Image (spheres, rainbow, N blue to C red):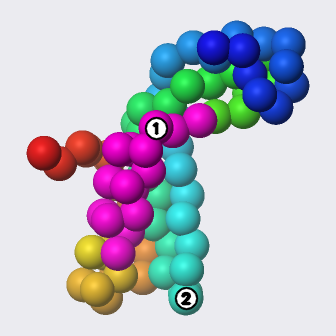
Amino acid sequence: MKCPICRHGETRPGSVTVPLERYGMSIVFREVPALLCENCGETFHDEAVTAALLKQAEQAAAAGVEIDVRRFAVVA
């Protein structure tokens, strides 16, 4: 798809690192599937990936995690 940010590059499947911070908690997800713009580097996640990221971050917060680095996994 054409990048909606720069309007010049095409997006390609890949993976990225996503850092999230909230209320003193820092969590880093590695190898998160995304579409990456070959021109500007902007990344896009589909709805299922975004929902899974947020759910896993909420679970980590509920468990009392303060700092964590983990490999992203889509849970069925």
> At numbered mark 1, what does the secondary structure look like: helix, strand or loop?
loop
Q: Position of residue 54 (x, y in %)?
A: 40, 63
Screen quadrant of the C terminus: top left
Q: Position of residue 69 (x, y in %)?
A: 39, 59
| Quadrant housing residue 8 | top right
Magenta span includes 51: yes
Q: Position of residue 47 (x, y in %)?
A: 43, 44
Q: Position of residue 66 (x, y in %)?
A: 42, 82
Identify which amino acid the numbered label 2 is placed on: Tyr
Q: Report the residue marked by disc 2.
A: 23
Q: Nearer the viewer, residue 18 or 47?
A: 47
Screen quadrant of the N terminus: top right
| Quadrant housing residue 3 | top right
Crowding near the residue tagged with mark 1, few <14, some 14–19, many ≥20 C-alpha atoms within 10 Å: few
Q: Report the residue marked by disc 1.
A: 46
Label 1 and label 2: CA atoms lie apart by 25 Å
Identify which amino acid the numbered label 1 is placed on: Asp
Above/below status of 11 relative to 24: above
Residue shown at the point (51%, 73%) measured from the top left: 26
Magenta span includes 49: yes
User: Pointer 1 and pointer 2: residues touching (CB < 8 Å)?
Assistant: no
Is label 1 or label 2 in front? 1
Residue shown at the point (35%, 44%) measured from the top left: 48
In the rendered structure, which segment of residues is drawn in magenta?
44-58
Q: Nearer the viewer, residue 66 or 39?
A: 39
Q: Describe residue 38's horizontal placement relative to residue 55 as left or right.
A: right
Q: For residue 54, which numbered disc appears in the image?
A: none
> At numbered mark 2, what does the secondary structure look like: helix, strand or loop?
loop
Helix, strand or loop: magenta stretch: helix
Q: Is residue 30 visible?
A: no
